[in-house]
Amino acid sequence: MIYYLNLFGTAVFAVGGAMAAARKGMDLFGVVVAAVLTGIGGGTLRDLCLGVRPVNWVTDCSGLEISVVFGILTFAYLRLREPAAVPGNLLNVADAVGLAVFTVLGCKTALANDAGLLITVIMGMLTGSGGGIIRDVFSAEIPLFFRKEIYATACLAGGSAYLALSGLRIHEDWAMLGGAAVTLGIRLAAIRWGLSLPALAPTPAEADKT
C-alpha cells in the first residue's frame, strides 16, 4: 500500500507541477522539469534532512520515471486545449491530494529513521509541501506555503492525526488513511471556503507593486 501510495502521490504532484509550468507558457522540457521537481522534490528534501543516503529516487527510480511520464502526458493533453482554460481549482485539488499522500508518507519515513514525534510531524509537512514550494518557485509564484492560505497547517494536522491513530494501535494502513484524510479535508475546505490564517497587511510600498 505504501509503495502504491507513493507512486500515486508522485503522479498527482507531477501533474500539478506540469500544469503550473504550462500555465506559464513553458516548453516541453520546462514542463517535464517542473513535473520532476514537484514529484520528487518533497521526498528529496526529507531524505536530506534525515540523513538518508542515497535519496529515495536514486535507489528506486520509479518516482523519477513516473514524474517524467506524467509530465509528458500532461503537456500532450494541454496541447489539445489552452492551458489558461484549465480551471485554477483543478491545480489546487491535485496539489491537495498530493499534499495529503506525501504528508503521511513523510511521517512514516521519519518514524522508520527513528525520528522523534515533533521531527516526524515536521518531516511530514516538509515532504507534503516541499514539492509545491519548489514548483511555485520554479514557476515564479509565491509558494502557497508562505501565503495566508491554510497549507502547511493542514500537513501538521494530518501528521499529528496519523501519529495519534498509530498511538492508539490502529492498523498502519488505516492510520495513514486517517492522517491523509485529515490533511485533504482541511486543505479542500480551505480551497472551498477561502479559510486562512491571520496575516499582516502589506506595507504601502509592497501594495503599490501589486
Image (tube, grey):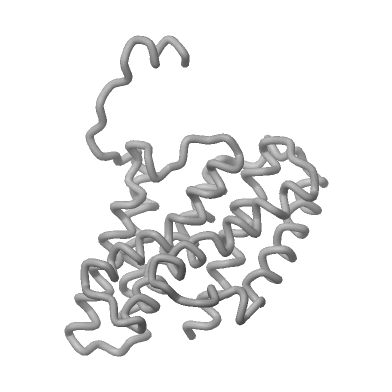
Percent of width and height locating residue 118: 22, 67
User: Would you identify the image quadrant in which residue 196 lies?
Assistant: top left
Give the residue drawn at x 33%, y 59%.
Answer: 155
Q: Return the residue nearer the eye: 117 or 13.
A: 117
> Is residue 170 rendered to the left or right of residue 95?
left
Tell me if residue 101 can be seen.
no
Percent of width and height locating residue 194: 35, 38
> Is residue 117 rendered to the left or right of residue 124?
left
Q: Where 148 sits versus 183, above or below? A: above
Residue furthest out toward the left? 168
Give the residue drawn at x 31%, y 55%.
Answer: 154
Tell me if residue 118 can be seen.
yes
Give the residue drawn at x 53%, y 73%.
Answer: 55
Please tell me how many numbered marks the rendered image carries: 0
> Is residue 16 rendered to the left or right of residue 153?
right
Percent of width and height locating residue 152: 34, 52
Q: Where 145 sits versus 115, above or below? A: above
Give the residue drawn at x 60%, y 73%.
Answer: 57
Percent of width and height locating residue 60: 62, 80
Q: Where 122 sits versus 88, above or below? A: below
Q: Where 103 sits versus 114, above or below? A: above
> Is residue 99 rendered to the left or right of residue 72?
left
User: Would you identify the image quadrant in which residue 128 lies?
Assistant: bottom left
Q: Return the residue nearer the eye: 170 or 54.
A: 54
